[in-house]
Image (tube, rainbow, N blue to C red):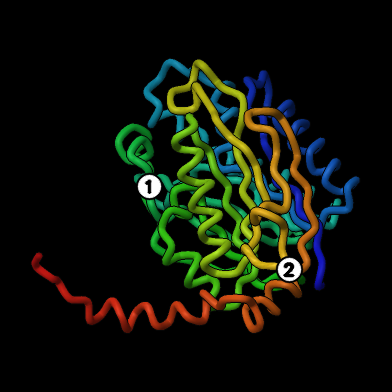
């Protein structure tokens, strides 16, 4: 597949009175993506957090997060079924997942294929509130996913601020980086946005960013959301002006849709005005022999 259509969500988190209400919101968005003939859609990080409003939101937040992990089987059943029914690849945002012992909780992104099968990429770098307040642990494995339209990588929110992840994906042939994100204010959002744009330029790849919007005032750490979904490109003649294929209006419930010409990525990595992915191999040689100069 040389061309695919992608949907990146600005997902509105709102209190729900039942799991079915959450399911209905997710299902309606997937149906919309199919209506617009999308091949891939991306939900944001922690969009599942609205399920906390089904329980006692006055408890310590680390206890609530662990209770949310009990919803993983139902979450998988819903999104796997929607991926099969609508013949879509769906990055299902993230949800807290317990380890086998139940002692540790991770922030995992589930990537579903049209067959309903899925792979998992855990978040590799944790923000302070995740470590200090939510008691969430980092995963240790970086994965790349082979699809009908090529190799895809996932960098969950803060992970996109570490360029080594996207560089490794580019060197392994990934043409698309998915960035599900959840940020509470503009500074956090801009860290993710600026780094996502940099990863697109550095590695000559498409970067698809999805964000939560709206708020859950009763739930710590998601009492505010600031987000703007975007589909970002390298900066060269074959791509969109300013390296932005599509973007939403900040902080509104939206679905951002764009069409990716994957052939342009392969061509740019060989024939681009500059070749940063290829030329980056020299960086290791240079930095290995850096010198300190006293002035």
* CA distance separating discs 1 and 2: 36 Å
In the image, 124 versus 259, the foreground residue is: 259
* Mark seen at residue 164: none
Quadrant assignment for the C terminus: bottom left
Q: Is residue 270 above or below residue 182?
A: below
Residue 40 image-quadrant placement: bottom right
Q: Residue at x 50, y 46 (%)?
A: 192
Q: Residue at x 22, y 81 (%)?
A: 289
Q: Earlier in the sequence, mark 1 or mark 2?
A: 1
Residue bearing the label numbered 2: 238
x, y percentage for residue 56?
Answer: 49, 18
- Callout 2 secondary element: loop
In this rendering, the count of numbered labels is 2
Q: Residues within 10 Å of mark 1 (few under 14, many from 20)?
A: many
Q: Is residue 134 left or right of residue 12?
A: left
- Callout 1 secondary element: loop
* Mark seen at residue 126: 1
Q: Is residue 60 above or below residue 294?
A: above
Quadrant assignment for the N terminus: bottom right
Q: Is residue 154 left or right of residue 88?
A: left
Q: Is residue 202 above or below residue 55?
A: below
Q: Residue at x 76, y 71 (%)?
A: 148
x, y percentage for residue 212?
Answer: 60, 35
Q: Residue at x 37, y 35 (%)?
A: 134
In the image, 162 versus 94, the foreground residue is: 162
Q: Residues within 10 Å of mark 2 (few under 14, many from 20)?
A: some
In the image, 207 versus 134, the foreground residue is: 207
Direction left: furthest residue? 294
In the image, 226 versus 267, the foreground residue is: 267
Q: Are marks 1 and 2 in contact (CB under 8 Å)?
A: no
Q: Nearer the viewer, mark 1 or mark 2?
A: 2
């Amino acid at each position: 597949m040389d061309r695919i259509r992608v949907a990146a969500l600005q997902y509105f988190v709102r209190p729900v009175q039942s799991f079915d209400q959450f399911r209905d919101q997710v299902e309606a968005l997937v149906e919309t993506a199919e209506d617009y003939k999308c091949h891939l859609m991306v939900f944001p990080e922690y969009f599942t957090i609205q399920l906390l409003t089904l329980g006692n939101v006055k408890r310590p937040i680390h206890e609530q997060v662990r209770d949310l992990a009990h919803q993983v089987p139902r979450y998988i059943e819903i999104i796997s079924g929607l991926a099969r029914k609508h013949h879509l690849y769906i990055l299902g945002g993230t949800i807290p997942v317990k380890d086998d012992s139940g002692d540790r909780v991770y922030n995992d992104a589930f990537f579903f294929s049209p067959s309903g099968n899925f792979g998992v990429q855990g978040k590799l770098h944790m923000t302070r509130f995740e470590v200090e307040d939510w008691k969430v642990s980092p995963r240790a494995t970086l994965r790349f996913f082979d699809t009908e339209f090529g190799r895809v990588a996932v960098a969950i929110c803060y992970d996109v601020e570490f360029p080594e992840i996207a560089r490794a994906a580019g060197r392994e042939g990934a043409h698309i980086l998915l960035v599900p994100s959840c940020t509470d204010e503009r500074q956090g959002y801009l860290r993710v946005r600026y780094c996502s744009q940099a990863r697109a330029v550095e590695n000559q790849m498409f970067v698809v960013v999805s964000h939560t919007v709206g708020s859950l005032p009763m739930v710590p750490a998601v009492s505010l959301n600031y987000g703007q979904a975007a589909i970002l490109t390298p900066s060269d003649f074959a791509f969109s002006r300013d390296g932005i294929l599509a973007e939403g209006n900040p902080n509104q419930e939206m679905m951002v849709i764009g069409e990716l010409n994957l052939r342009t990525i392969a061509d740019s990595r060989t024939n681009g005005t500059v070749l940063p992915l290829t030329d980056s191999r020299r960086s290791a040689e240079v930095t290995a022999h850096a010198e300190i100069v006293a002035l």
